[in-house]
Image (tube, rainbow, N blue to C red):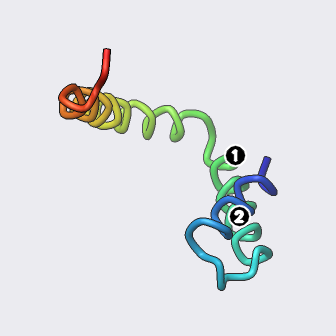
Amino acid sequence: VLRTFTEFIHILNMPETPEIAILCFMILLSIWAVKSGPENMARIAKTTFPVVTAFVIITVAVSFKDMDF
């Protein structure tokens, strides 16, 4: 999974960055998330869920005019 995400980021956003640098950063981030425990991840999810939900609702509402039912 990390390899797939690394290739996606490399091809789409950072073509000049070596894939190994992106992979190392993602591995370090994964290790930190696991070591911090599920409580911290749940707290972050609890905080960001309303924001993501609002963005989805706003995106759907704004795109109604372009929808072809």
Instruction: Indicate the quadrant containing the C terminus: top left, top right, bottom left or bottom right.
Output: top left
Q: What residue lies at 73% left-to-right and 77% top-to-bottom?
A: 21
Around disc 1, counting alpha carbons within 10 Å, would you say few (fewer than 14), some (14 to 19), or many (20 or more)? few
Amino acid under disc 1: Val
Q: Nearer the viewer, residue 1 or 66?
A: 66
Asked which quadrant contains residue 6, the reply is bottom right
User: Considering the numbered disc 2 on the image, is that residue within a helix, a strand or a loop?
Assistant: helix
Measured from the top left, where is residue 66 in percent x and y?
25, 32
Question: In the image shown, does 53 or 69 lie closer to the viewer?
Answer: 69
x then y, percent, for residue 41: 53, 39
What is the C-alpha distance between the residues marked 2 and 1?
A: 10 Å
Numbered disc in front, either 2 or 1:
2
Relative to residue 37, is residue 59 drawn left or right? left
Q: In which quarter of the image is residue 39?
A: top right
Farthest residue in the top direction? 69
User: Quick check: 18 above or below 50?
Assistant: below
Query: Which residue is at a point 43% across and 40% down the rendered structure image?
Result: 44
Query: Residue at horizontal 69%, vertical 49%?
Result: 35
The label number, if any, that marks residue 28 in the structure image: 2
